[in-house]
Image: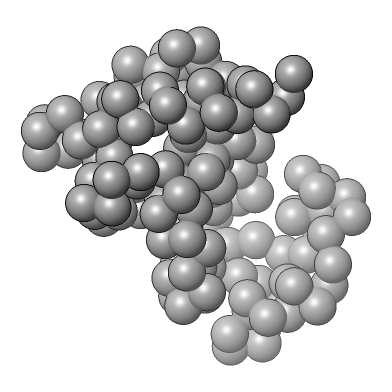
Amino acid sequence: MKLRHTLTIVAAVAGLSACKTTETDQDLFLKADTNKDGKLSLAEVNRLGFPRLFGRFDRDGNGSVTLADVRVVEPGFKETEFVRRDLNKDGRVTFAEYRVVAERDGDIKVAFEKVDLNKDGQICRIEAEKYTAKLDKEQD
């Protein structure tokens, strides 16, 4: 698989496609597979995905992001979406707030289920490869 494929898989699972990385497919899969069973559970994907996604916006590493921080990365990001994530309404979204909203909205779970072709709650390399092959066909 190509690097963009793993990122696409993880993106489908955890919204990571926009995270710039030099990690290979193998590196990402192995890093996410914390119990080393050769499969990715939703919990494993969340453990890797949430910090990577949040870190994309928290460029200074201070643990929170403002709307201005987000717009540096995504200029068209809607203020209403930011406000929805700012649970305590202080003008900053912390990692904890981000995670609560992400888990509540279930976007990662929905994406995970698309890749988990046999619906066993795990993504194995074969499912990941099948999913990327499908994406390749859609891009052609």
Percent coordinates x, y for residue 66 in the rendering: 72, 64
Residue at (68% x, 81% y) in the render:
84
Q: Is residue 109 above or below residue 93?
A: above
Q: Is residue 37 above or below residue 111?
A: above
Question: Which quarter of the figure has residue 24?
Answer: top left
Q: Which residue in the rendered view is the most extreme toward the right?
A: 76
Percent coordinates x, y for residue 59 in the rendering: 63, 43
Q: Is residue 61 left or right of residue 82?
A: left
Percent coordinates x, y for residue 110 in the rendering: 47, 60
Q: Is residue 64 left or right of residue 131?
A: right
Quadrant position of the C terminus in the picture: top right
Question: Which quarter of the figure has residue 8?
Answer: top right
Residue at (52% x, 22% y) in the render:
133
In this rendered view, identify the residue nearer to me: 138 or 74.
138
Residue at (54% x, 52% y) in the render:
54
Quadrant position of the N terminus in the picture: top left
Question: Which quarter of the figure has residue 21?
Answer: top right
Q: Is residue 90 above or below residue 12?
A: below
Q: Which residue in the rendered view is the most extreme toward the bottom?
A: 88
Residue 20 visible in the current orientation: no
